[in-house]
Image (cartoon, coloured by chain):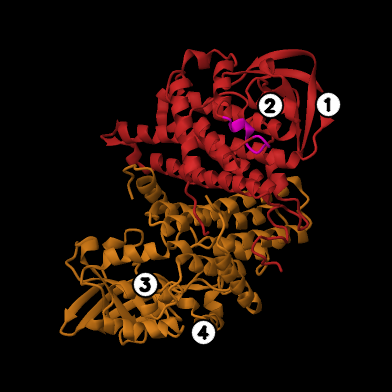
Amino acid sequence: MSLDLSLDDTQAGVVTALEAFCREQWDARSSEAQSGAFPAERWAELAEFGFFAARTREGEAGALEVVVAMETLGAAAFPGPLAGTFLATQLLAESERDEVVAGRSIVSAGSGRIYPYAPAADVFLEIDAGAVYRVEPVGDVSVRDTIGGERWGEMRVERREEFPRAEAALALYRTALAAYFVGAGSAILAGAVEHASGRKQFGRAIGEFQAVAHPLADSHVRLEAARLLARSAAERIEKESDQASGEACAAHFSARRAAVEAAHVSHQVYGAVGITLEGPAFHLSRRIMQSAALPPTAASDAAALYAGGGSGTLFEPLDPRGRAS
Amino acid sequence: MNFSFSPEEEAFRRDVIEFLVPHRALEGFIQQGEKWPEVRGLFEEMAERGWLSLAWPEEDGGEGLGIVHEYLLWDEFGYARAARNPLAAGIVAKTLIRHGSPAQKARWLPPIRRGESHFSLAYSEPEAGSDLAALRTRARRDGDHYVIDGEKCWQSYAQDMDYFWLLARTGEPGSRGRGLSLLIVDREAEGVRVEPLPTLDGDQLNAVSFEQVRVPADQRVGPENGAWGLMGEALADERHIQFPAGRLRRDLEDICAWAESQGCAQDPVVRTRLGELAVDVREAEMHSLAVLDAMIHGRDAAAAAAANKIAHTLTCQAIARAAMDFGGGAAAIVGMRPELLWRLSLWETIGGGTTEVMRSVVARRGLGLGADS
């Protein structure tokens, strides 16, 4: 089989099902979404799709289904610890994993003193460079409201165990997060493009002006590359390729950058209406910026991609094309 | 979804890699002007394997293979820096295959396939660069000939090529794209003058003037005044091989090796920047695959190709500039890799359609905006 970048029927089915679910069950501009409370009911409904079991013994879905699901959820600005849940399902033992997969146990994957969704969380994971630890809160958890309109926790933690096989789990986590960025970034950009097509100033649609159109085009270029990189990372995860981890780092870096850029460009194109709370952009841009604050950092992705001395992930002699041999 | 090539395609790629082993020092991709005799020899060697006519139909003397083979071939040539895909076997031959008469095909295709006939584009003019439809070079019909008068400029490789693939006005002044025709003009024809315009990468562009140059009418390809559509088709035929991402990977590898040789690769700022550039290269590779995928599956690849050019050429410049930014006087020494790559990279965002034109293509064709050209 040769190159084919289109979705297969299963993947297209995931998109259709989740688009319908989000349309009916989740309005990111609703009062429920604005309340800051963890939407436990919606979370349990999402869990019923079974995606959280992806790449576990019980799961049917693979990494490519995770990616298209995350793109769709990102476009809807769906809340909650989506990527962190995939990290946990790859690391936890079966009994604990079942609770996470079913949406009954909530995961907080953080670093330093900030833990996402901590007030609602049952399982705490610390991401530190290439390692993942199970941690427990020590002392009080201070509830912090986030830019994304959610409640996270500031707290001290103690490490309880370091998980083996963290690299593979982090690859799926990074890839899932990348796909969420792609979905959210594409959605905010699509809205801005529509606005630029309809909004007239100086007698013309503002999208006819290069000064408006070109940043939107650049943003589209970045997002399309990130979309394919996330899907490529998912394919490598499925094939258990040695390069899955590096590709996931590249995808995460690329998608994070593309989505943050799309958010900024879109706000600029929307003008004043974009900075209103009820406007067309903030429900997405706040989620993009919040997700950009999740570990690992862009710098850690980049550092993982260039280790130097010929051992950089993308440059090692095991080049897939065998050029070095 | 599948990001891989078939075993047969990968086997072809390995053949190409093996073929390129003795040519790794050639660097014809980045210094074609200086290396032209060797590059020409390389093309003749390729021709013996049928590699200049890989995707031509078999009835036209080609190998009848798919565009994936062409993509893999030129991607590896880019990585090895051996040579850029020649215009003759690409745009010229594919236009002749689509629109040439049987006599034209019989005359022009065999020497192109053998790597013996080489062409340079003669499109741009002093007053018609991005706005090509404004060109003024005139081709006046005179019996069984056309008589060419006009000035072309910024022509790559014209000094070494055998023929011009000339775009000239056969319609009324002001007829824009509706009044243009394509003609094959012998570089040695009387009245043709090629003046070098030395460029900052050590190569040259050329200004070419045509004064009362007589060209047989049977060297017009396609209908009179019908060139615009042909040019669009020819560009579409070549989108998958225009910007081989292998070249970017090679540039970045060179810059990594250079940073290590200079002792700055352990600087965290340098390492982070190299990691970022690795992402840029992967992004460009994804755009290349997107173009190829669209073409394989019969979708319009115009927006994907414009996106690919933007990503590829900006990354090419970013790699070269990063090495200059890392500091260290060696980067400025003529002949060292960073300064050479920097000088070479500046043309990339201009030749073959500027970044600004490409952004407008993405805005119009990819996003549906009514952006100005």
Q: Colour of chain B?
A: orange
Mark 2 belongs to which amino acid?
A: Asp
Q: Report the side of B9 relative to B64 (left or right).
A: right
Check disc 2 and report its element: helix, strand or loop: helix
Assess whether mark 3 and mark 1 are in contact (beta carbons under 8 angstroms): no
Return the chain for callout 2.
Answer: A
Q: Which residue is mark 4?
A: B48
Is residue A51 within the magenta segment? yes
Structural crowding at the residue carrying mark 2, measured as other residues with C-alpha within 10 Å and reported as few (<14), some (14–19) or many (≥20)? some
Structural crowding at the residue carrying mark 4, measured as other residues with C-alpha within 10 Å and reported as few (<14), some (14–19) or many (≥20)? few
Q: Are the residues under badges 3 and 2 in a single subunit?
A: no
In the image shown, does A128 or B208 lie closer to the viewer?
Answer: A128
Return the chain for callout 4.
Answer: B
Q: Are the residues under badges 2 and 4 in a single subunit?
A: no
Give the image location of residue B128, x and y in percent.
Answer: 32, 63
Question: Which-is-in-front pick, marks 1 and 2?
Answer: 2
How far is the residue under mark 3 from the one under mark 2?
59 Å
How far is the residue under mark 1 from the one under mark 3?
65 Å
Give the image location of residue A9, x and y in percent.
Answer: 47, 43
Q: Report the side of A206 relative to A215 (left or right).
A: left
Task: Point out the tag, 1 or 2, that comes first from the N-terminus.
Answer: 2
Q: Which residue is mark 3?
A: B94
Question: Which-is-in-front pick, marks 3 and 2?
Answer: 2
Mark 1 belongs to which amino acid?
A: Arg
Mark 3 belongs to which amino acid?
A: Lys
Image disc number at residue A98: 2
Instruction: Name the dominant secondary structure of the magenta segment.
Output: loop
Q: Residue at x 68, y 60 (%)?
A: A319
Q: Residue at x 72, y 13 (%)?
A: A142
Task: Look at the image and give the residue range highlighted in magenta.
Answer: A50-58
Tell me, by letter, which chain the rendering colours red.
Answer: A
